Image (cartoon, rainbow, N blue to C red):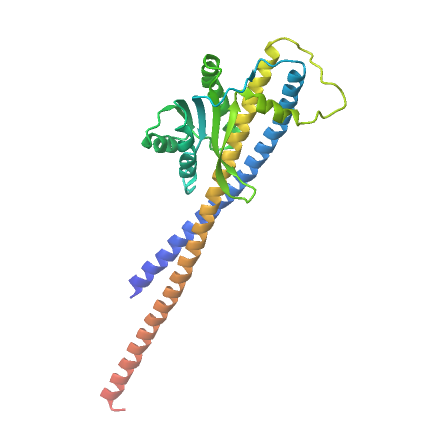
Amino acid sequence: MSMSLEEMGQKISSASRVGRVVHIMKLIAASQIRKCEEAALASQHYSDTVSSALFALLYKGHYAALKEESGPSDSAIAIIFGTDQGLVGPFNDRIVEYAAPILQRYRKKTLFVFGSRLKNRLEDLGLTIEKCYPSPSSVTSVASAIRGVLVDLEPMLLRNHECELMLFHNHLSSGKKCEPVSTKMLPLDESWKAKLALTSWPTHQIPQLVDKSEGTLEEVLKEYMLVTLARTLAESMESENISRLESMQRAEKNIEEVLTDLHIGFTLFRQSAIDAELFDVVAGFSALTNELGT
């Protein structure tokens, strides 16, 4: 009887330890969400600055980077952001289900992927992956990850100016839910120019260029790509940690329910053991009394 009680006590102890681990992981996920939000916000501020620089360049007639509207392209370079980390639910599955049908529209496509788990899912659908990058585990490694992608992208974009550069990632919607989205980052076409034209210049001064060389536009476009990729990766990591936080909350609730059932079972089992021992004592006392005749 005591052994059974001991086993039940061990189960309660194990469930409590798992619960403490889940609670710590939930706190870590919440902390990472905050850091990703700050990184995405900082990227947005810098993106606004880069957009102002592009506005100034276009205002001065630097239209070399713009593509004339000529219908959809048949070739694309896609960067798909997933994760190698666990406990994120259907995080990778959502982006695969969203991106695969869109990619099928392109006759030629080159895929760059963050996360080997995402890579395996895409390959199962018959898609060929050009290169797979490890998914960053923290916002401090975002910059180095993005620089690696840009090094691989630059020669491909120089060879094919008509190619579309697409980004696919999970994004936190206005309803605080993670959902997959896509963004066409390049080429900069007339519709992009029209959208930029809606942005008002922050001052009443006419934008001026200090450096009027042709290399200025190229450098600003590099910064545009850098900050767009950095913001996208930060948003993807924020969605990842929100998915992990939701998983930890569900796990914590399940553990609390299991612990409640175990405690009730342990109390009932222990009470039954005490009742059995008392019954044995009473039965033994009764037998001894009858034997002595008193």
How far across and how far down the image is residue 235, in percent?
53, 34
| Residue farthest along the left direction in this orientation | 291
* Residue nearest the observer in this picture, 120 or 279: 120
How far across and how far down the image is residue 24, in percent?
48, 45
Q: How many marks?
A: 0
How far across and how far down the image is residue 265, in percent?
37, 65
* Residue nearest the observer in this picture, 252 or 59: 59
Q: Quadrant of the N terminus?
A: bottom left
| Residue farthest along the right direction in this orientation | 204
Q: Eyeballing the image, is 277 above or below 168?
A: below
Q: Quadrant of the C terminus?
A: bottom left
Residue at point 32%, 59% (across, down)? 7
Q: Eyeballing the image, is 88 above or below 204?
A: below
Residue at point 48%, 22% (across, down)? 164
Residue 109: quadrant of the picture: top left
Query: Quick check: 41 left or right of 131?
Result: right
Query: Quick check: 85 left or right of 190?
Result: left
| Residue farthest along the bottom direction in this orientation | 294
Residue 261: quadrant of the picture: bottom left
Query: Quick check: 65 left or right of 121?
Result: right
Residue at point 72%, 26% (across, down)? 202
Residue 118: quadrant of the picture: top left
How far across and how far down the image is residue 176, in percent?
54, 44
Q: Eyeballing the image, is 20 above or below 275?
A: above
| Residue farthest along the top direction in this orientation | 213
* Residue nearest the observer in this picture, 35 or 51: 51
Residue at point 71%, 18% (across, down)? 207
* Residue nearest the observer in this picture, 234 or 125: 125
